[in-house]
Image: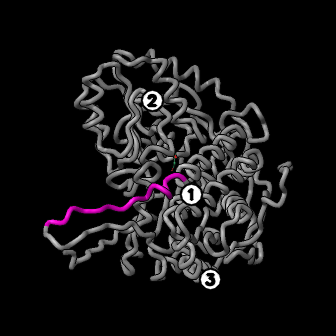
Amino acid sequence: MTLNLQRTDLIRAGHLIDGRWCGEATFDVTNPADGSRVGRVPDGTPADATAAVAAAHAAFVQWRARPAKERAALVESWHDAVMAHQDDLGRLISREQGKPLAEGRGEVAYAASYIHWFAGQAVRSNGEVIPSPVSGKRLLALREPVGVVAVVTPWNFPAAMNARKIAPALAAGCTVVAKPAEDTPLTALALAFLAEEAGLPPGVLNVVTASRANTPGVVGAWLADDRVRKVSFTGSTPVGVHLARESAGTLKKLSLELGGNAPFIVFDDADLDAAVEGMMQAKFRNGGQTCVCPNRVYVHAAVHDAYVEKLAARVRALKVGPASDPEAQIGPMINARAADKVERHVQDALAQGARIVVGGHRLDRGANWYAPTVLVDATPQMACACEETFGPVVPVTRFTDEAAVVAEANATPYGLAAYFYTQSPARIWRVAEALDCGIVGINEGALAAEAAPFGGVKHSGYGREGSVHGLDDYQHIKYLCQGGIV
Ligand code: SIN
């Protein structure tokens, strides 16, 4: 299957270190829809990782000294280059990640929105003049870039997750070493290529690719290196905990956007059509492979059957297919391990008394495909309620009491997103305030936006991406005290 890119040079086959494309391409990047090869990239080593840090560290001196307006202009030129290649990048994302082409193109715009946002924030990164508590002194607080930032990103949004970490780092005056997910490194390399074309100086953004086996060596070299002052990671909670432990020795700043187990609650006064629409957006985007996907669905007994019937009709009508099919609305899982997990969750739920309304089986298209599924009679003991399924399964549980369902929604170590549907203004405040999480969707399924703070609490991590808070994690505050003022 050919990619048909306008710019075939967007497919890179090397690390980007200090403005040079280097390394021998030895491992294949494959299309999860059919296993065909999309590209081949180098398998990075600790030596590559350290060379990237050396480049980023050297480049930091000049990059941080550039006026914010100049950094903003370069970041904005990167944005323009990304949007100018939206179609090519969308194709590349879809091919290496598996999402439908419309979603691939949409992800490019989503990624670009963060780049644009942080170009704007670069010039608004004001310090403070602090009223002095004593005479004769003047107190100020400056915002300064932390230094070299290690960016470690997942495969589910190969463009957006890189953009929303790299753009604020660059805007703040930091330099970057990035390690994209082994399943989807090509998009990150293409983004870096466009950043270079847009005029980013050598060494400011470096990308090292690595296989699953070599990733610990590359990231481990960064964790141990004192010149790396911050790590920004999106991925699983166990890996986030590992990164926190391993970076403790050099006291790096950390942003961790980790696993979720989002509840989705439909109260008896909800607009059921809106709640169905919200579920379709939140659950089936990217085949259910987002960390904010609803994972546990609670529907009030009074509207349970009507809601399930409406939802089932929509899920049954979803068109499953590869990115090459322009009508496809949902693609494969990223790999067979991911499909195995979905299958295990469904089998476990059935063994514990759940019933299938739609789907509930693998598809006859290859090892990575699983049918969009709706289950009813789910219980808190089931694996699909305790673990993040990361696939297209909606397990529905019936409830009757508001306080009990909120307690159940909070009964998880995770706290990223939560959703609820109700028309009661008082309940909106009660429930939104009682939910233990970083992001709440109220009568809405599409939550993320560059202007909004994205991040979790508890085992879902810490730090916020996007919004006016998004630069904070890439800066420290320096206090200046001037005395002798008479
Ligand atoms: C994620 O799945 O990590 C991010 C989802 C989003 O940006 O909406």
Q: Quadrant of residue 142?
A: bottom left
434 or 297, nearer to the observer: 434
Which circle's residue, 1 or 2, is located before the other in the chain? 1
| Residue highlighted by disc 1 | 154
Which circle's residue, 1 or 3, is located before the other in the chain? 3
Q: Is residue 273 above or below residue 436?
A: above
Q: Are marks 2 and 3 in contact (CB under 8 Å)?
A: no
Which circle's residue, 2 or 3, is located before the other in the chain? 3
Q: Is residue 39 above or below residue 372?
A: below
Image coords of residue 49 (percent x, y) = 60, 79
Label 1 crowd (10 A; few <14 / some 14-19 / many >=20): many
Residue occupying image coordinates x 22% and y 75%: 485
Image coords of residue 14 (percent x, y) = 74, 71
Q: Nearer the viewer, mark 1 or mark 2?
A: 2
- Residue 345 as seen in the image, left or right of residue 439: right
Label 2 crowd (10 A; few <14 / some 14-19 / many >=20): some
| Residue highlighted by disc 2 | 444
Q: Note whether ligand 1 is within 8 Å of mark 1.
A: yes
Question: Of the residues shown, which amino acid type is indicated by label 2?
Answer: Glu
Question: Of the residues shown, which amino acid type is indicated by label 1?
Answer: Pro
Q: Is residue 200 above or below residue 352?
A: below
Here the colouring is: one colour
204 or 264, nearer to the observer: 204
Query: What residue range appears in magenta?
Result: 120-133
Residue 399 covered by magenta stretch:
no
The residue most toward the front is 486
Identify the secondary structure beneath mark 3: helix
Q: CA distance from mark 2 to mark 3?
A: 45 Å
- Residue 336 as seen in the image, left or right of residue 437: right
Residue occupying image coordinates x 59% and y 33%: 372
Q: Is residue 209 visible?
A: no
